[in-house]
Amino acid sequence: MSEKLKESLSAIIDGEADEFELRRVLDEIGKNEELRATWERYHLIGSRLRGERIDKRAKLRQRAWDELDFSKVDNVSEAPRLDVDDGPQKRPNRQLGRWTGIAVAATVAVAVVLGFNNFNTPVIEPVQDIVVLDAPLVDGSVVALALQAEGTAEDIRRQYARMIHHAQLRGMYRQGFTPFLKMVTYGRQ
Amino acid sequence: MKRLGLALILLLGSFGAVAADNGDPRTWLSDMNRAFTDLSYDGTFSYFSGNDLASLRIVHMVVDGEQRERLVHLNGALREIIRTGEKVSCILMPGDELLDLTDSIPSGPFARAFVRRYDQISEYYGLAFYGEGRVADRPAVRLSVSPRDHDRYGYRLWLDKSTRLLLRSELIDLEGGRLEIFQFTQILFGDEVDSADLEPTSRAGTVQDHFELASKEAKPIPMSDMPWRLTWLPKGFTMAAADIRRTPSESKSIHTMMYSDGLAAFSVFIEDMPQAGAASMVSRTGATVAVTHLVAGPNRAHHLVTLVGELPTPTALKIAKSIRYRGI
């Protein structure tokens, strides 16, 4: 493995990669066993330092998500993007952009490629292995799909619309104003 | 061992004394509901859900037999919810993110949901008084609502000692962490509430978005017409409402079902696969989890299921995965 690749991988793990470095690793990692092993080893070291138990590959994706820097989510427009499909672009609104920014974060992009080497194949079967986090989360395979299409922002928008709808349904079911708290605070979280 | 036994007797005895003073916790929950709808109150409160702390004001009165309510977000761009009976209006500033969503929400009125009483919830939750407290400078009775299984969250409630209005609530996850906190910081009751404060803020440029919560005219659709069924439900959850609606923007049919155990609730929305996107995903805001999943429908075509509710994530996933089309 070349030194440049190693440096790019370190930069991604340290959160300092630029788009060029990310592209370099993404192009290689699907076909380069050594690079893949190095990526996993870096994460294993980090996990051991944190005293975590190491087990499945699913944990790798979990850790990738864990390592996302939520303080950087405002830099959505600067987030690296995988140009797999250049469909019509829509500027996401602030709330949706936040999650879009997270979806294309570098560590996740690499984890997705690692977890799903066939990510050009649309996955339409029910997904059994959903990664669960405290913040809005996406299963690895779905990130792959979302990165290819304009689906991510639309999916999140749809999910939020259903959340608001649920709040309205609760409003007619439950006495008092508390069901509407989700509505009135929407997007301010 | 004897000492432990004695301690237990003393402990249980002291809880018994508190319980005897306050009566049945279920009565307090019913009274809390009644207080929400029957009393006049005007208060400011804090609401923590997810990552943010919001400050809000609520004004509530019954005018000519009709409930009127005004809920105001006190931070950021103007946002108010005005409720008059079953009609609800959102007062927003142009460009509000909330407006973007309304095109995707089927418009009402819905058939009124079947509201469960609190008689049966003690089968699924342990109810106990646990002392007294003080919230917004008012004495409060504390009530714990502990789930009896892992399929629902618990609550700690502070109810106003004299009016029984909810002054503070904490929504507790299975590990004892607080997912949401609601707490009045100041509140007025009765004659101190001015009906003029029910009027929406008049500010140039605001936009309104209306919807109707429920209508006596709208009839619930019979279960036999709902082609979807849940093959697994947590104990105690029963259907509270079901409907088939079209969204204003896409004229897309959405099948909607809401279930509740008397405290917690979740809604299931099933629709045709959208043209783009359709990711399976899970998101969480405070206690509310949303699961989007795919399910085979008529002609084995994929349909999109979105489940939203105040449930632990594994439970929400299990329910979402149990949805089946009739005959499959």
Image (tube, grey):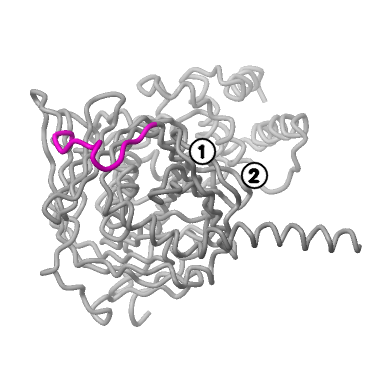
Q: Residue furthest left?
A: B204
Check the residue under mark 2 and report the chain it is in.
A
Which residue is identified by label 1?
B134
Q: Could you say which is closer to the camera, residue B167 or residue B189?
A: B189
Image coordinates of residue B300 in percent, x first then y, are 33, 72
What separation in Å lies between label 2 and label 1 (alpha carbons)? 44 Å
Residue appearing at x 40%, y 70% in the figure = B323
Q: Amino acid at mark 2?
A: Lys
Residue flagged by tag 1: what amino acid is it? Answer: Arg
The reply to whether label 2 and label 1 mark residues of one chain is: no
Residue at image location 23% in from the left, 32% down from the top: B79
**Is A78 in front, or is A161?**
A161
Residue span colored magenta:
B186-197
For the C terminus of chain B, give its image quadrant. bottom left
Please tell me whether mark 1 sits on a helix, a strand or a loop. strand
Q: Which mark is residue A59?
A: 2
Q: Is residue B188 visible?
A: yes
Asked whether the residues under the numbered discs 2 and 1 touch, taking CB atoms below 8 Å apart as contact, a structural biologist would say no
Above or below, A174 relative to B81 = below
Decide whether residue B193 is among the magenta residues.
yes
Classify the position of the N terminus of chain B by image quarter: bottom right
